[in-house]
Amino acid sequence: MIKRWQRVLNQVNRLIDFFIVSLSYIGATCFWLLVVRQDPTHPALLPSNLLWFSLSLGFVSVFGYQLARLYDSVRSKQFQFDVTRVLVVNSLIALACGALYYVFRLTDFSRVALALFFLLSSTLVLTKRLLVRAVLSYYRAKGYNLKHVILIGSGALAQKYAKTIAATPQYGFVIDGYIGKSSGVDGLPCLGEWASVGNDLLASPDIDEVVVALELEQATLLPQIIAATEKYGTKVSIIPHYNDYIPASTTIQSLGECKLLSLRTTPLDYPGNAAVKRLFDIVSSLLLIVLTSPVMLFVAIGTLLSSPGPVIFKQTRVGKNKKPFQMYKFRSMRVNAQEDTAWTQDDDPRKTRFGSLIRKTSMDELPQFFNVLKGDMSLIGPRPEIPHYVELFQETVPLYMLKHLVRPGITGWAQVNGYRGDTSIEGRVQHDIWYIEHWSLWLDIQICLKTVFGGIINKEKVT
């Protein structure tokens, strides 16, 4: 039943997307040429051109969404999955159309209208998908559009899966029962032991999926269970007994006949993502250096007048792949012997009054834009520490060294969530790892905006 309705919903989804994209092009073209430019004689407004190109874009977009797997079931995926893939597909289509305009000198179409079409179609398609998700989540929570699951296992993993499903009714999974020991999963009916009921249950057409959650000592049953699901054509998912050690960013690689689980694969391990982030860093740092140059000149003069010593304070920090680098800051303290081992406090006697001011307003961090330009740092990422504390936290804070999988940043997910200065290292590391595993360009932009509108002025006192 669920599969039939999924097919119907997908067909309706495709049809709606086709009309949204086609009408978006017509609307964007008419708005630009009739309302803004007031040019009703433009060739792009000819009915043949308008209809042909709008229908072509509709077909190509739906085909692209299909390749991006946007019509697969997304009930267990976050909305960010939709946002990323819709924007990527629409961007590629817009760039391809722009290239065709340029190569074939097409004067019957408008490049500005194409840009407006990209914005309009992306907004409308994503809004539609958000509404569909909201409606489906509502009805699933009410007990409709459910996916029926048989759980195989009765230990801690099976308990964890059952609790997760119970806590997320909006995803629409319902566990009809479990196969295992009678004293196994609380709140679920026991359907019996695998040896007596396994094959008979999997033959039922009412089962949408089988979830295997066996403990280590039950692993010998796995070949039988897999063989049975393949025999009856039942979809199967497996929760491995080492589930607690697998992060969300795990990928599978094939080496001959061996399947390797890469536990710490991050989005930035992919060359395309790394190139996008680096380009964003270069463009942003150049722009920010130009925009903040008057402020940097003011801070440099103030630093010189506040106390003897250099304007720029260079300190060794640990960067990507645990490699040390020299991080730049405007000097906010008197020259001292503890600069490589001690954190600053609100009432730190080493700080100058001007230094307190520039630390309060984060102006002391401005020279780090040059670190970003050099490639030592990124605009967004985990904050780097001095070697003394890296060695200390490596032994005392779980997962601390994973932050060095990426370039350190001027600001980061931990900082915009309140973890800056003398705060919980454990909390900071948890936020840093979450950022590394969930990186996207949009996430970087969000952090930049949060930093500008809420993270520049910090809680440090001016003394």
Image: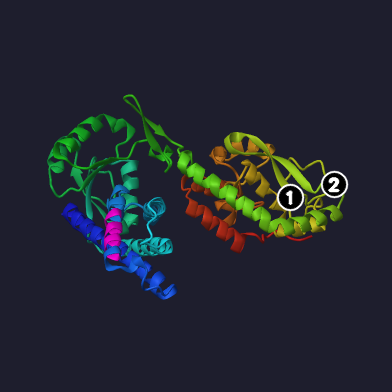
Give residue 55's position: percent from left, percent from top.
26, 60
Q: Nearer the viewer, residue 33 or 336?
A: 33
Residue 316: give its label. none
Q: Are marks 1 and 2 in contact (CB under 8 Å)?
A: no
* Magenta stretch: dominant secondary structure: helix
The range drawn in magenta is 50-60
Q: Secondary structure at mark 1?
A: loop
The C terminus lies in which quarter of the figure?
bottom right
Give the label, 1 or 2, closer to the camera: 2
Q: Quadrant of residue 110?
A: bottom left
- Residue bearing the label numbered 1: 344
Residue 70 appears in the picture as rendered: no
* Mark 2: amino acid: Gly
Quick one: quadrant of the N terminus? bottom left
Expressed as whole percent of the image width and height from the top left, the position of residue 331 reads: 78, 49
Q: Which mark is residue 309?
A: 2
The count of marks equals: 2
Name the spot of residue 62 as percent of width and height, x first. Answer: 28, 55
**What kind of residue is marked 1?**
Thr
